[in-house]
């Protein structure tokens, strides 16, 4: 996965490849959730759901034709609102045209489309805003997962969410968050020292937050406090995203969403934390942009 995804996320000339691969991921994730629903929808209904997922994803990213630009406010445009309304309208029609598709299915499918699209689409948007943010996001979620597992498997005694994910412990979760916060918070604070130039730091920022005008008068210590706090929150949000995915699987009594990644499961199994944390990071960066 690293051999394929790392170049796509990091090398600007491969950006179109990233958009295509994530688009395929949207379709696969849509298939995974429809599969666990295990409902006998008509082929026309399924094709419409795939179409709406892909269209929503394309509309979310298609007006972005450049990278490393602070253009988060453009997320809130009429095209995305139009697709949301259209998706709701068409899915309501399906409740009449497909006898196996009722109003419970409408709510589940409508929510599923935007869980998948906003989650995976947020990874592309973060790459557009700046490569430093996608590096920061993945490091935070990966370090959190790795150390939560290592500490939890050895010292975990208190179950965090026994009815949702029995193997997760408070000891592992706390350790994963604290270690990720220290490591990634320090990395993001000294990002400019680590990557002084090149496509990983085209604007020669000292920290990953230097592009926001509201933070321009804050000294390095102040930015450090903000970065450690933000990393702490993203680490927690990523673990909550993992629990959201686990709750879905628990409700539908499946172990994994899919098996496209041997040993990891499906697209949603592998990227559940990053998707949830990515949506949260976009919210934070958008508010900073507005301010």
Image: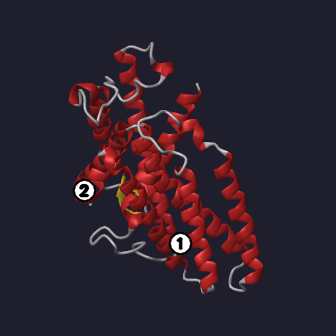
Side (left or right) of 197 relative to 90: left
Q: What percent of the width, then of the height, locates residue 230?
A: 42, 34
Q: Quadrant of residue 5?
A: bottom left
Q: Which mark is residue 50?
A: none
Q: Which residue is mark 2?
A: 2
Q: Position of residue 63 (x, y in %)?
A: 55, 47
- Between marks 2 and 1, how big is the CA–CA gap? 31 Å
> In the rendered image, is residue 56 in sight?
yes
Q: Position of residue 14 (x, y in %)?
A: 33, 51
N-term mark: 2 or 1: 2
Q: Are marks 2 and 1 in contact (CB under 8 Å)?
A: no
Q: Quadrant of residue 38?
A: bottom right
Q: Secondary structure at mark 1?
A: helix
Q: Please, what secondary structure does the residue beneath circle 2 have?
A: helix
Residue depicted at x 43% and y 15%: 218
Please tell me which residue is depicted at 72% across the width and 78% down the height of the picture: 102
Q: Which residue is mark 1?
A: 251
- For residue 75, above or below residue 34: above
> Considering depth in this image, is 114 or 78 the residue closer to the camera?
78
- Determine whether, in the image, residue 186 is placed left or right of residue 50: left
Q: Is residue 164 visible?
A: no
Q: Nearer the viewer, residue 167 or 140?
A: 140
């Amino acid at each position: 996965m690293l051999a394929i995804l790392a170049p796509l996320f990091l090398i600007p000339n491969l950006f179109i490849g990233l958009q295509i691969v994530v688009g395929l991921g949207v379709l696969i994730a849509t298939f995974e959730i429809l599969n666990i629903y295990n409902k006998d929808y008509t082929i026309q209904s399924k094709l419409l759901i795939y179409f709406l997922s892909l269209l929503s994803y394309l509309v979310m990213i298609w007006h972005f034709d450049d990278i490393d630009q602070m253009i988060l406010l453009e997320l809130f445009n009429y095209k995305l609102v139009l697709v949301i309304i259209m998706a709701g309208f068409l899915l309501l029609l399906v409740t009449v045209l497909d006898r196996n598709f009722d109003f419970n299915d409408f709510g589940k499918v409508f929510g599923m489309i935007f869980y998948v699209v906003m989650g995976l689409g947020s990874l592309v948007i973060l790459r557009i805003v700046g490569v430093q943010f996608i590096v920061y996001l993945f490091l935070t979620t990966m370090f959190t997962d790795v150390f939560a597992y290592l500490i939890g498997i050895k010292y975990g005694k208190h179950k965090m969410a026994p009815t949702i994910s029995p193997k997760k412990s408070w000891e592992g979760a706390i350790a994963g968050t604290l270690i990720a916060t220290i490591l990634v918070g320090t990395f993001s604070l000294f990002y400019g020292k680590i990557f002084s130039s090149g496509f990983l730091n085209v604007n020669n920022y000292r920290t990953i937050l230097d592009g926001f005008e509201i933070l321009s008068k804050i000294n390095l210590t102040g930015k450090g406090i903000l970065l450690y706090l933000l990393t702490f929150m993203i680490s927690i949000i990523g673990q909550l995203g993992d629990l959201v995915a686990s709750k879905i699987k628990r409700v539908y009594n499946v172990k994994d969403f899919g098996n496209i990644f041997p040993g990891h499961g499906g697209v949603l199994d592998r990227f559940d934390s990053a998707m949830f944390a990515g949506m949260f990071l976009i919210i934070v960066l958008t508010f900073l942009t507005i301010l």
